[in-house]
Amino acid sequence: MSTEPSAERGPWSLALRRFLRNRLAVAFLGLFVLIVVFVLAAPLWADHVAETGPNKEHTVEQITVDGEQKDVVTPEGKPIGPQWFGAGGKFFLGADSRLGRDEMVRLMYGGRTSLQIGITAALIATILAVVLALLAGYFRGWVDGLIARTLDTIWSLPVFLIGLSLGIALAVGGLKVGPFELSSGSIWNPIIVISIFTVPYIARPIRGQVLALSEKEFVEAAVAQGASPLRVMFGEILPNLASTIIVFFTLMIANSMLFEAGLSFLGAGVQPPNSSWGTMITVGVELLKIQPLLAILPGLMIMLTVLALNIVGDGLRDALDPRGKARMDAALEFESQGGTTAAQQGAVV
Amino acid sequence: MKKLGAVIAVLVLAAVASIGLTSCGGGDDETSGGGEQGGVLNGTYASFPDYLDPALSYTAEGWTAMADVYTPLLTYKHANGEEGSEVIPGLAKELPKISNGGKTYTLFLRPGLKYSDGTPVKASDFPFAVERMIKLNSGGSPFYIAAIEGAEKFAETKQGPIPGIETNDKTGEIVINLEKPRGTFTNELGLMFVAPLPQDTPVEDLSANPPPGTGPYMITKSQPGKGWEYERNPYWAKANGKAMPDLPEGVIDSAKMTVIRNPETQVDDIEQGTYEWMQNPPPASRYAEVKEKYEGTQFRVEPTISTYYFWMNMNRPPFDDVKVRQAVNYAVDAKALERIYAGQIAATQQILPPGMPGYEKFELYPYDLEKAKEMIKEANPSDMDITVWTDTESPNNEAGEYFNEVLKEIGFNTTLKQINADNYFTVIGNQSTPDLDAGWSDWFQDYPHPNDFFQPLLSGESILPTNNGNFAELDDPAVNKKITELGEVQLGPEQEEAYKELDKEIMEMAPWAPYGTRTLSTFVSDAIDLESVIFNPTFGHYLSSFEFK
């Protein structure tokens, strides 16, 4: 029996070992898990600690803080600041606005919304992108031309401006196409907008990989054995794209969350009274001078989540494609010594 | 009127711009000490007025910007508060003589008047201004189209003259014949829409190059979106000031207005003395701080004649049931809304606001959430799904969110729709917009006459397919009849009493859940004498009232 670990372990197991050796990536994966746990615990905190819902208003109410009665919102419209555990966990981070909603509860529920949008939009965009890339890369010819030019067109659009316009249109009027209907306040509106505009960012590089893979011997062998195009694309090529797809998916969650935050900040994403971290920044900005935490906290949560996902994504890429990392390191070293990389030469050409 | 939206828009617009200008360009000698003549006033607006053309502007910003530039035949007393609601002669010698059963108005132009370019003012300039306004499809034209004989046909054909207006340039006589008696017409002659203009004024929007006027100041430069400047009208001292001694000549020499879209920056600039005045109130987030620090010295709260309310569409379930509408009135807590508006709103529960003739305080629906829930249970509405509309401007958006939660609290399933403030009234005023169930709105007076709160907002005649103003779609024959009849007679104690009754009668039907009347403010730098600044309920701050200490 061989004791050689590499002979026993499969590529996924090796990748896992490589990923676990990357302490930074593991640490940020831990941070991301903590964030997920934090937002999943929203109903527990809301029901048992804060005893209020995310949209429940307490404008004219008072709370007892260390035996003293305090207005949740003063008659001059100033929301109460963080009370930590002074009021038994109620208004832990203060009130969110002149409506007197619990900031902590909204931060947790808002995080659920932001993550839900980020993950769903990234998933839809990735699935669409992979299908399009497989079709374009495998069939080539006019199919490739049509798909590639469509992706180029989307890529060339001022994404945020169009996303914003589309987001506002959907937010106001909803969407009705045949039996398919979305109400104006649906969370699916920003998801659709984000998915559409992020497809090219995944589809283009994957298409390149499909082009390369479709010339490999195992693909030619499958074709020679009479495998259908569907079987070749999804049975032979797709498994070889898995590592790339996983990395892109992770990074696209982060991108989608940023996109959502931007859309919501501008009023085209999540619709009130529901919260997301983006909408919470919008509300907080107005009170920046008197309650700066209201804008800073959701911003910090977005930053930490995006940072964590990016570092985990990089870690996954290094773990799943170590030769790619080696190539990149070599290129960077060569560049630092004054050389010109092939990619740069290509760019110049 | 839709200027109300703009008044509020002023509160919240975000973004930044600031042009540093010295505060007293006129020099120390001219500006310092004891309210001496002279000085350059540097003011800021949070947005450029809708128009700088008297025929077109229909916003508080526009009217404030032009109040001392264009003088109508009649105008409003240059005074604060209720005193400022008094109609006084402007270019006309005296108030109109009303004859023919309230259908004929006769006025005489004051002699010797000149525009700021030196052109003599003629009686025939008045019908020219009316025709120009109608040709430009001004938002103010409905007042005059409905009133003046032959104006409706003119509006269709755009071919003049309007037969209902006769003038004599030699004697300065202006005779206006109305289709039917109209008790509000004196007030309507005091609006800037029909301020006389030279007859060679182009029939186009002149916001970038405002036409000559007859007031103490003239606009010498306008950069739409950025700002505009004033100088003294050279013909005020030579002619108009002598002809209209009852109107103030103004103290400052000139003024420069700059658009600064971030109200936070505006407040900082006033505090630092970079600018001397901001037209809009401080933002809600700074309001308490500014009020506490500067009230009485640089800051003053200004009451407005306005009503903020939630409307309920009486033609759609569940609001076709009066019990449901009354329940909603019980559930709305005006105290909560006072906090949402950071103290810039005073709680009321009726249509007519304080300061309006005919106002008498009553409170039909004291806050009682439990009673509201009980009433909903009793009414047992068949449709529990409601769409709630509001605009995106703070704090109106928060008021809409509050209303949405109130409806949820009493058992309804709600969907909140927030529409950009620029389009909000167009969207909810269009009857083809689906799900117009309930929502937020406000109304600032066009002129100090109670009919202005009933005819456009609560009369069946005002329910229109587009540009609808009667969002509750109240169409009660008895109410319509009263509104029409009251609108045809001049306002007197008897009519005021009738408006008082009408207010209560309509609130018993509860088409609205009114919650407050808005206060605005005057905020100036320490270089300005706060006492001298006049805030008129119709035109806002008069430029002619600013005075350096």
Image (cartoon, coloured by chain):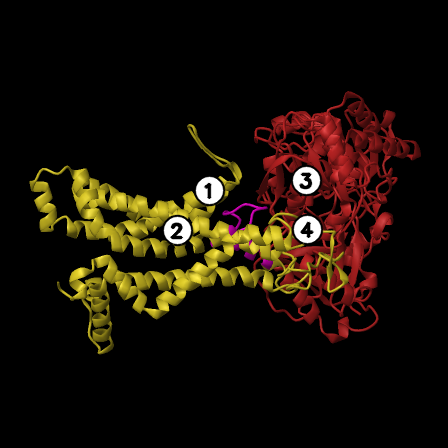
Q: Position of residue A303 (x, y in %)?
A: 46, 62
Residue type indicated by callout 4: Glu
Say whether marks 3 and 4 touch (CB < 8 Å): no
Residue type indicated by callout 3: Glu
Q: Circle 4 sits in a helix, a strand or a loop, which is it?
A: helix
Query: Disc 4 marks which residue?
Result: B61
A104 or B293, which lies in front?
Answer: A104
Query: Disc 1 marks which residue?
Result: A189
Quadrant containing the N terminus of chain B is top right
Instruction: Identify the mark nearer the N-term, 1 or 2.
Output: 2
Q: Work out how far the residue at label 1 is from the one at label 2, CA to CA, in angstroms.
A: 19 Å
Q: Nearer the viewer, mark 1 or mark 2?
A: 1
**Parent chain of label 4:** B
Chain letter for yellow? A
Q: Work out how far the residue at label 2 is from the one at label 3, CA to CA, in angstroms.
A: 42 Å
Residue type indicated by callout 2: Pro
The reply to whether label 1 and label 2 mark residues of one chain is yes
Q: Circle 3 sits in a helix, a strand or a loop, which is it?
A: helix
Q: Work out how far the residue at label 1 is from the one at label 3, CA to CA, in angstroms.
A: 27 Å
Q: Nearer the viewer, mark 4 or mark 1?
A: 1
Q: Which residues are magenta?
A: A262-284
Query: Disc 3 marks which residue?
Result: B409
Q: Is residue A69 left or right of residue A277?
A: right
> Image height check: is B232 above or below B331?
below
Q: Work out how far the residue at label 4 is from the one at label 1, CA to CA, in angstroms.
A: 36 Å
B119 or B132, which lies in front?
Answer: B132
